[in-house]
Image: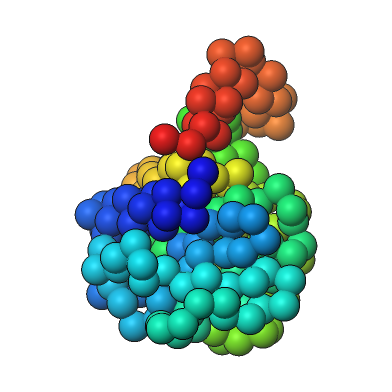
Amino acid sequence: MSSLEIREELCKYAKKTVANRLVVGPGGNISAKHEGKMYLSPSGFALDEIEPEQWVEVDIETGAVTDTGFRPSSEVLMHLYAYRANPNIGAIVHTHPPYCIAFTLVEQELPIMFPDQAALVGKTVYIPYVLPTTDKLADALVEKVNAASSILLGNHGLVTTGRNLREAYYRTEVVEESAKIFLIAKAIKEPKVLTKEEFEEIASLESEAYRIQLLQKMQ
């Protein structure tokens, strides 16, 4: 995949985040890795406004902006540190989904409740509130990126990672739906969650392994 194709892919999933109300206004940021560089949303833009040429190219090793024009998102350190810490990460989606944020106001780590969540996301971890756009938040995220592909940020939002944008984005959708289901159920009674054994049974299914392979393919 060329850098232009990466930029076009970023535009595709950036538009999805806005269309599905995972961010509002100029909130959130997403990136993808390609040949030692990351392509990150520029500062001050609503994600659905970004054109392919406006994604900011940043050298992952040095942190240098390697093309001219726009400033990278103010969360640039969070993305850089995550790519450096886990070479298997190919894309990062940071959004402000309403149910995820609501969940962090009353709970912490999201339990596993249903098969899609178990197979496509797995464990979700939690970081207590840290001032956004700071190296403290980036450092806190780095401590979690090898433990889980979805990270709830207290009073802030959600970060999901994947081998590609498609995987990272759909993990965002699944986690937001999971938070919504949990909060609806919690309003009625204590939610019934999957046991460790039930989760492991789902993870071991050949059909789910095949579905995950499809999710990881770039389209």
Who's the residue at 28% across and 72% down the image?
Answer: 46
Instruction: Residue at the far top: name it.
Output: 206
Position in image of residue 135 (x %, y %): 67, 84
Q: How is the image coloured?
A: rainbow
**Residue, x 50% and y 77% (percent of image)?**
67
Q: Residue 18's spot in the image, x, y percent?
A: 27, 60
User: Can residue 190 be spotted in the picture?
Assistant: no
In front here: 217 or 207? 217
Q: Nearer the viewer, residue 213 or 63?
A: 63
Image quadrant containing the C terminus:
top left
Residue under the image location 41 percent in, 76 percent down: 42
Question: Which image quadrant is residue 146 in?
Answer: bottom right
**Residue 97 appears in the figure:** yes
* Left or right side of 91 for 156: left
Does 166 sit above or below residue 72? above
Q: Residue at x 56, y 28 (%)?
A: 212
Residue 185 in percent (x, y) is at: 39, 43
Residue 23 placement, left or right of 215: left
Vertically, is 54 above or below 185? below
Badge count: 0
Q: Is residue 97 left or right of residue 139?
A: left
x and y percent of residue 31 in the render?
50, 62
**Position of residue 144 in the picture relative to residue 178 (left or right):** right
